[in-house]
Amino acid sequence: MINKTLLTSSARNIISRTFSTNNHVQIVEVSPRDGLQNVTQTINTNAKIELIQRLASAGINKIECGAFVSPKAVPQMSDSSIVVKEVMGSVRELSVLVPNVRGLERAMDILADDADDSNNISDDISSCVTEIAVFGSASEQFSHNNINCSISESIHRFREVTDVVKEHYPKVKIRGYVSCVLGCPYEGLNITPDAVARVAEQLVAIGCHEISLGDTIGVGTPRRTVDMLRCVKSAIGADANNNTTATAASLAVHFHDTYGQALANIYAAVTEEDIRIIDASVAGLGGCPYAPGASGNVATEDVVYMLHDMGMETGIDLEQLVMAGAFISDVLGQESRSRTAQAIMAKKQQSSSSLSSLGKGRCNSSR
């Protein structure tokens, strides 16, 4: 029998809560954009295309495939138009980042060139790109340093984007990112849950169907994660399944693993706050250029391994996912940061070596 007097308030909440019966978790794969955008070496366009195709074949339904940003600012994303065109038939839900109306127009103009029927360009585009994403911050200093404007100015820019999408491309969904939800490279840990909630609330108000809450520098802990999520859910009116009746906004979490807390934070978000949308990056690719020592996004392989053991469904084939991570790691000339992938690949190599030794033994014994 559990002695509740010995439990922390957090543990008592876990025991007393009524959990969602939904055991499906959607993985949003961000490696082709967030994972690769800061890589300094030039990555071949065909390698990016193959990565996305491998991820889709592994069962990932939603992939952020590129960004329509300034090629000078982010040269790695300069081939996003080519990548998107090549993978649009392979990915069920294809998302791209657009920072402003200019980026949106660039994305839509390029895709419109590929439209089969000029009388139904809107429908053709929505069948190619199902979602566009805008990127804001809960930190004023980070907003100024990252996108050169204040938080209020960024919301104004995003409203211009969402207004165009709603008017001309009503079938295209809009995702809103909020960065620095648990800490900032400039403001430290002085980011309050209320500050995060205010930005999330404004993104919902301008039409975002989904809000991704990002621990950009990877300093969050499970306790602070839960506190932040509860505050945001209260502000946007999310129910137990993170849906709101008025706006249909959903919450996603996006963790970096700088302090090794990403999986613990995800576990808390899933079990305590019923979060069912998780951003992740295969092989742990990515990182924040403004955070020294940041070790990248949480690895998709590690997240999927944990979720499957929890009895959650993702629809993802872990072995194929590991191979996709191995592919892009080989392209980059680096080892995968996923501990799960490292263990599985080591086991494969050991098994292969054993079979090779067994074959040589048989060959020798027959002489």
Image: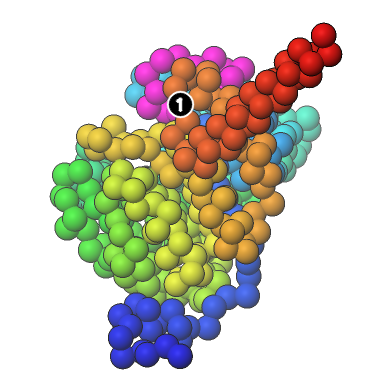
Classify the position of the C terminus by image quarter. Answer: top right
What secondary structure is the magenta-colored segment mainly?
loop
Closer-to-camera residue (156/281): 281
Q: Which residue is mark 1?
A: 335
Is residue 46 visible to the viewer in this orientation of the structure?
yes
Question: Is residue 355 magenta-colored?
Answer: no
Name the residue at 43% across, 44% down. Answer: 298
Task: Name the image quarter holding residue 58.
Answer: top right
x and y, in percent, of residue 124 in the image: 72, 38
Task: Please indicate whether residue 66 sits to the left or right of residue 24 in the image.
Answer: left
x and y, in percent, of residue 100 in the image: 41, 38
Name the residue at 63% across, 75% down. Answer: 21
Report the amino acid beneath label 1. Answer: Glu
Q: Is residue 161 above or below residue 201?
A: above
Q: Which residues are magenta?
A: 35-48
Task: Name the image quarter holding residue 309.
Answer: bottom right
Looking at the image, which residue sits at the far right? 366
